[in-house]
Amino acid sequence: MSAATVTTVPATVRATVPVGEGATVARRGRPRDARCDEAILHATLEMLNEGGAGSVSIDGVAARAGVGKATIYRRWSSKEALLLEAMGTDTRALESPDLGSLRADLEAYFWALLDRLKANPNTDLLPHLIEAACYDAEVRNSLDEYVSSRQKPLRVILRRAQQRGEMAANVDLKVIVDVLVGPLFYRRLLTGDRLDRAYVNKLLDIVLSPALLLVP
């Protein structure tokens, strides 16, 4: 865990923030301690990797990070918000292979994705977050942002294919991403059917049909 410099300030520091026109209110508080944030996020990731989302609790995270529950709740409104920020600290994003063709790039990308999924057998995290997102707008927004950031390498591959003329310029990349990624998580989370390179190859055969992607 990296050290961070923290400036000590009185607990009664006051700041004024505007409310309407010409009005102010006093706000008390102290700056967030970066070391404390790091300890909480690290503890959350450890518990998540050890036992999945079901093993993570605010009590458990607080005990492992050596902080009080109130310290966590001052920073994150819910366990799900904490989980999403902890997941966002994982910088092991998949790369955007550039092997000269869309098919080769997608194969390399999905082989790496399959390896990542196999290395993480816990499958309860995404359903847990999706359920929370159904009734918590903050979690919904955070989950959307997280998913979008994780899909960035795939969007890079598809835009590069458009620039090479392998895909029509007017193809909706968001829809293509959904079509490519959706079946994998459908099998992983719902059916439990085999998820391997043979399946991905069949998927790419269908999605990369010239009738669907190439310029007429």
Image: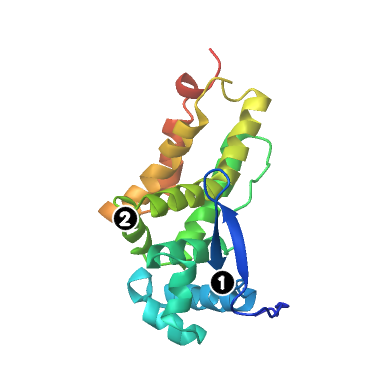
- The reply, left or right, for residue 3 in relation to residue 63 is right
**How crowded is the residue under tag 2: few (<14 C-alpha within 10 Å), some, or many (20+)?**
some
The type of residue carrying mark 1 is: Gly
- The reply, left or right, for residue 190 in relation to residue 167 is left
- The x and y percentages for residue 155 are 57, 38
Determine which residue is flagged by label 2. Answer: 189
Determine which residue is flagged by label 1. Answer: 29
**Which residue lies at the image location 64% right of the left edge and 34% below the top edge?**
101
Q: Nearer the viewer, residue 121 or 99?
A: 121
Asked which quadrant contains residue 118, the reply is bottom left
Residue 193 at least partly seen: no
Q: Earlier in the sequence, mark 2 or mark 1?
A: 1
- The x and y percentages for residue 148 are 51, 45
Callout in the foreground (2, 1): 1
- The x and y percentages for residue 183 are 37, 44
**Which residue lies at the image location 44% right of the left edge and 82% below the top edge?**
62
Asked which quadrant contains residue 129, the reply is bottom left
Of the numbered discs in the image, which one, if any, rests on residue 125? Answer: none
- The x and y percentages for residue 13 are 62, 73
- The reply, left or right, for residue 55 in relation to residue 45 is left
